[in-house]
């Protein structure tokens, strides 16, 4: 978590051009320690005030632990106050039966289209105590304003949301996935406040290689029109053969708009990381999880549910080297070569 959070501070090299003088760094260090201590004291105070309010507003909420870590020898994240809020929802339509006294934690996967969140969600849902209810804010009326968003969140977190993923009675962690462009950044202040107040565990899931993501978006929108698989559009597939058919389409990438597009995407991700930095969060990159599925155990620990092996039937669509997946590879190559996005050309 520590290392991924460090990487997360600028994963897309947005600040690469900034000048970093070493001498000023040192003198700032002492000041930073002072500010840090002061902000810890403040945040503890704010937190204790918040917590009192939380239990007033949500009667089925219990704050289990509130702790401040020791003064750090500069650690990246442990300086934050860690508050664990658990809930005992009372769904409107059914009784939680024998699990009525099972603690429930709330979570939200904050991600972007074509970044592996569908795959990630099927993995989470293979856990008997985790319900991740999909992209519930894809429907515009649910995010038309803050009060619709809040009402929707309340319904999901009260275990009143019915989807194929809902496990009802014995759910120990309930959540959904939320794309940054679905009202999340537009209403970031209010949403962050809600997340902090109700102890929502935030899981950032981004893709490191934004070029691969870009190709995936183009291919997916092509398939939405052409419906390559027997006339049905599929964003995710369950067999190698289906994946091969979808990957057979090689998009043409506009070299002029490519870098601005990658920049915009990177900026959105950075904005989300900043604006929701005060929530209880974990940052994951799709590529890292694919390479090392042990990262999934970190997620289960973060959600405080029993650690189990997770499974999915989904198959990765684009597995070939990038040069074979783009129609005008030479253009793309010469556009990115020498730019700060050069590593996207050959990295996985
Ligand atoms: C909850 O129950 C009521 C009454 O039985 C029903 O009308 C309503 O559709 C149910 N809600 C959901 C979300 O299933
Ligand atoms: C997980 O679900 C199972 C089966 O529904 C239930 O028996 C168990 O108590 C649940 N565990 C937790 C931690 O909620
Ligand atoms: C298309 O449909 C045929 C006949 O139903 C089936 O055999 C084939 O596997 C399908 N192909 C794909 C790519 O889904
Ligand atoms: C989040 O906060 C931590 C600790 O205060 C800080 O080191 C980090 O740079 C922040 N990350 C972002 C993306 O703002
Ligand atoms: C895989 O991830 C786990 C948990 O984050 C980490 O402890 C481990 O070192 C990683 N293994 C490799 C080979 O990177």
Image (tube, rainbow, N blue to C red):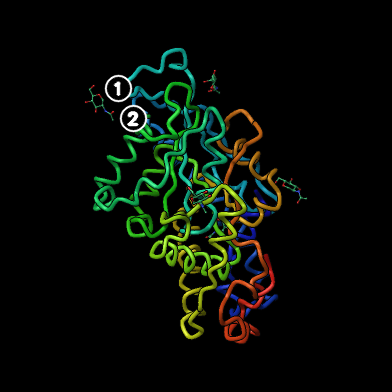
Between 34 and 95, which is closer to the camera in this rendering?
95
Between 190 and 210, which is closer to the camera in this rendering?
210
Q: Are marks 2 and 1 in contact (CB under 8 Å)?
A: yes
Q: Is residue 273 above or below residue 65?
A: below
Quarter the C terminus occupies: bottom right
Q: How many marks?
A: 2
Q: Is residue 313 above or below residue 307?
A: below
Task: Tell whether circle 2 marks a residue whose Cβ is less than 8 angstroms from ligand 1.
Answer: yes
Task: Tell whether circle 1 marks a residue whose Cβ is less than 8 angstroms from ligand 1.
Answer: yes
Q: Earlier in the sequence, mark 2 or mark 1?
A: 1
Q: Which mark is residue 160?
A: 2
Q: Is residue 228 left or right of residue 331?
A: left
Quadrant of residue 194 within the rendered picture: top left
**Neighbour class for label 2 at 10 Å: few (<14), some, many (≥20)?**
some
The residues tagged by marks 2 and 1 sit, at their Cα atoms, a distance apart of 7 Å
At horizontal 35% and vertical 56% (from top left) the residue drawn is 182
- The percent position of residue 208, horizontal first and vertical second, equals 60, 63
Q: Is residue 114 above or below residue 299?
A: below
At horizontal 44% and vertical 67% (from top left) the residue drawn is 222
Identify the residue under disc 1.
93
Between 23 and 254, which is closer to the camera in this rendering?
254
């Amino acid at each position: 978590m520590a290392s991924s959070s460090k990487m997360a501070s600028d994963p897309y090299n947005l600040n690469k051009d900034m000048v970093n003088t070493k001498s000023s760094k040192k003198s700032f260090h002492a000041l930073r320690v002072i500010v840090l201590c002061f902000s810890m004291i403040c945040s503890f105070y704010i937190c204790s005030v918040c917590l009192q309010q939380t239990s007033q507003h949500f009667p089925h909420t219990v704050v289990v632990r509130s702790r401040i870590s020791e003064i750090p020898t500069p650690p990246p994240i442990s300086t934050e106050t860690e508050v664990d809020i658990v809930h005992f929802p009372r769904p409107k339509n059914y009784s939680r039966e024998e699990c009525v006294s099972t603690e429930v934690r709330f979570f939200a996967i904050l991600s972007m289209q074509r970044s592996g969140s569908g795959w990630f969600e099927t993995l989470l849902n293979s856990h008997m105590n985790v319900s991740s209810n999909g992209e519930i804010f894809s429907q515009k009326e649910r995010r038309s304003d803050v009060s619709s968003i809040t009402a929707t969140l309340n319904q999901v977190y009260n275990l009143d949301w019915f989807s194929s993923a809902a496990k009802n009675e014995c759910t120990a962690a309930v959540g959904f996935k939320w794309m940054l462009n679905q009202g999340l950044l537009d209403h970031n202040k209010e949403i962050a406040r809600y997340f902090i107040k109700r102890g929502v565990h935030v899981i950032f899931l981004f893709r490191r290689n934004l070029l691969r993501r870009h190709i995936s978006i183009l291919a997916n929108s092509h398939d939405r029109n052409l419906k390559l698989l027997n006339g049905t559009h599929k964003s995710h597939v369950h067999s190698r053969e289906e994946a091969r058919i979808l990957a057979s389409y090689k998009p043409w990438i506009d070299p002029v708009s490519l870098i601005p597009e990658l920049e915009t995407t990177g900026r959105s991700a950075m904005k989300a990381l900043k604006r929701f930095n005060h929530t209880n969060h974990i940052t994951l990159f799709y590529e890292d999880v694919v390479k090392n599925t042990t990262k999934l155990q970190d997620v289960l620990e973060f959600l405080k549910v029993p650690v189990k092996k997770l499974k999915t039937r989904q198959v990765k669509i684009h597995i070939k080297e990038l040069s074979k997946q783009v129609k005008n590879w030479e253009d793309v190559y010469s556009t990115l070569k020498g730019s700060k996005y050069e590593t996207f050309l050959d990295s996985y």
